[in-house]
Amino acid sequence: MTSRPNPFGAHYNLISPVIEFGNAAQEGIDPTLAELIKIRASQINGCAACLYMHARDARKNGESEERIYMLDAWRESPLYTDAERALLAWTEALTKVETDGAPDEVYEALKAHFTEQEQIKFTLLIGAINAFNRLNVGFRVKHPGSAMQKAA
């Protein structure tokens, strides 16, 4: 396997603007909604490092284990509000933008629950987490638990 740099190590200065962008995007957003965005996009993109971090952060913010586990099946689960469902659909549409773009019905559902400012902030946050997913997946950044699993 080819060795790849860890962008969060010696090259932190290159990614610090993305970190600042992500932090600014989620300012004023309900932390529960922010973590749902980050976890769902990370599930789609297969980013173990982000899944580990954001599931941990969601728990710290009071999110239940059940809602974290069921997030991949949010359409079938009664655990999410209509507003959360609209946001999760928007997250999926923009994370998989190559599939259908941003369908009008998905946007209309988002618009029914959130202000224009919230819509823009959510969209910026979706872009930020997708950037982090691509950094982690592209450079095969391991999540903290992976070292412990190898030792066991």
Image (cartoon, rainbow, N blue to C red):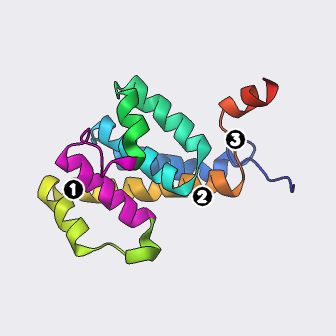
Which residue occupies the foreground of this view, 84 or 72?
A: 72
Q: Are marks 3 and 2 in contact (CB under 8 Å)?
A: no
Mark closer to the chain start, 1 or 2:
1
In the image, the segment drawn in magenta is 73-95
Q: Is residue 78 magenta?
A: yes
Cα separation between marks 3 and 1: 34 Å
Which residue occupies the foreground of this view, 149 or 8?
A: 149
Q: Which mark is in front, 3 or 1?
A: 3
The amino acid marked with disc number 1 is: Gln
Residue 18 visible? The answer is yes
Q: Position of residue 47 (x, y in %)?
A: 58, 49
- Residue on which disc 1 sits: 117
- Residue on which disc 2 sits: 134
Which residue occupies the foreground of this view, 24 or 142?
A: 142
Q: Is residue 126 magenta?
A: no
- Asked where in the image residue 66 lies, by quadrant, the reply is top left
Q: Quadrant of the N terminus?
A: bottom right
Kindly identify which numbered label has been placed on residue 142.
3
Q: Secondary structure at mark 3?
A: loop
The amino acid marked with disc number 2 is: Arg
Mark closer to the chain start, 3 or 2:
2
* Residue 100 higher or lower than 67, as above or below: below
